[in-house]
Image: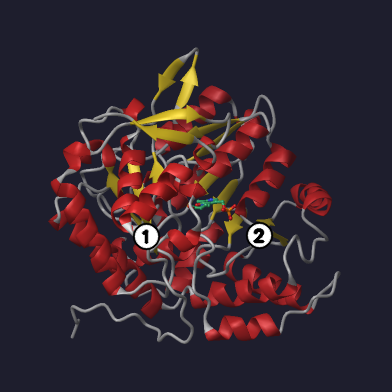
Amino acid sequence: MSWKTIIEPFKIKTVEPLGFTTLPEREAVLREACYNIFAIPADKVLVDLLTDSGTSAMSAEQWACVMRGDESYAGARSFFTFEAAVRRLTGYRHIMPVHQGRAAERILFSVVGGPGKTILSNSHFDTTRANAEASGCVALDLPAPGALDFDTPADFKGDIDLKALEDAIRRIGKQNIPMIVMTLTNNSLGGQPASMANLRETSRIARHYGIPVIIDCARFAENAFFIKRREPGFASRKVSDIAQEIFSYGSGAMMSSKKDAFANIGGFLALNDPDWAKAAREILILGEGFPTYGGLAGRDLEAIARGLTEVLDEEYLTYRIRSIEYLAEGLRKAGVPIVEPPGGHAVYVNARKFLPHIKPEGYPGQSLVCELYRTAGIRAVEIGSLMFGKTENGKFVPAPMELVRLAIPRRVYTQSHIDFVIEVFADIAKRRDRLPPMRLIEGSQRLTHFTAKMMPEPV
Ligand code: F0G
């Protein structure tokens, strides 16, 4: 029997109060924050869908592991527990903890990036792109055809475009391409999975040209579960086996353990190449810490090791993916256009379509983000021209999409929180034509969305 109600596969042992505010308070908070939701104090937020990163509820077992943390500077027992867990999953040889995903990016790109190089990817996440570009190299996205057609669902919109990949390698030259990064799931374009067939073929092409494939595996378990659900031949395979097969098509991985390891901080860089690993360790020591702790406490290493196993639990993954679909169903019913199908960790609202009266230079995504907060204290994030737009020769170049991501923290909210979010959207949908465009008053060169200052304009 498959029941309609979502059963969260856990019971709640510890609770945290939510931040209730009044409308005038929220309006003041928005003004104070210059309409940048990153500047809003979290205790003024009711439902925080800003990110699924570092916001998971840890399990009782993970907290027990925290107590077992060995805080020795070098050779801590917790490191070996962590190393064994990462190796069991990925099969890679050299495993380095880092304080979070972007540290792995910075280290790896400092070793093999640099001017004249191009990194190819199904899509770089924003920090991945920024770290690649900061090293001097070009970050080129080659998403699957159809990935930007948000209205048409497809099973594996996170695939890399294999034809574009081969063309790019021939055009740019394999000697100028230090790696292909497969981001699983593809966060920038809707949290969509890549298929095993696509990973296998990417690996074949990469091997042919002698280019390593590195997996950005922040959400590897969600990707593996989608493969089980959607790809012929995988229905009866264990998700843990599917995950191992995914890693077999790469020769290294960067992970933000703040996602599919249920940890509040942490990550790793795992590499097969001994020369890359040696160079990476030197940079690790310089900026993160000794290679057996890499900027983390022993207790964090323990929590991550445990989380990497828990996340492969199929009851958990069934609930996880179902609860995202449930939000998507509610939004569709409320007439809110979303990226189809919903992703593994988030539903992405198509703000360009929802607010057609706001041009990209008026940041429709940011306008919706501010209205969600103003109306009900819901915090979401813009993935559009505020995050990816540019100014070139004094001219505004919009991002290819104007989305608002509703990321769902793992094991944190229940179905009634999600029902509330749907109700708020239904209310905003009725008066969407009155949402104002936004103006950027102050930005920065890189990752401007974190610090930008904005103002609503007259409608
Ligand atoms: N790669 C992907 C696919 C990510 O989604 C993130 C972070 C990172 C790398 C960087 O990891 O934050 O630990 O340094 N994504 C967060 C988000 C910030 O909200 O999607 P980090």
Q: Quadrant of residue 351?
A: top left
Where residue 322 appears, x then y in whole percent? 28, 69
Which residue, given by chain and number where applicable, does mark 2 sit on? 268
At x 41%, y 70%, the residue is 18
Which residue, given by chain and number where applicable, does mark 1 sit on? 344
Viewer-nearest residue: 260 or 196: 260
Q: Report crowding for label 1: few under 14, some 14 to 19, many 20 or more residues within 10 A (C-alpha).
A: many
At x 51%, y 62%, the residue is 259
> Farthest residue toward the top?
393
Quarter in which the C terminus is drawn: top left
Q: Tell me which label, 1 or 2, sits earlier in the chain.
A: 2
Q: Quadrant of residue 247?
A: bottom right
Left or right for 338, reference 387: left
Where residue 407 appears, x then y in whole percent? 39, 57
At x 48%, y 44%, the residue is 33
Where residue 102 appears, x then y in whole percent? 62, 49
Q: CA distance from mark 1 to mark 2?
A: 21 Å
SS state under label 2: strand
Viewer-nearest residue: 421 or 84: 421
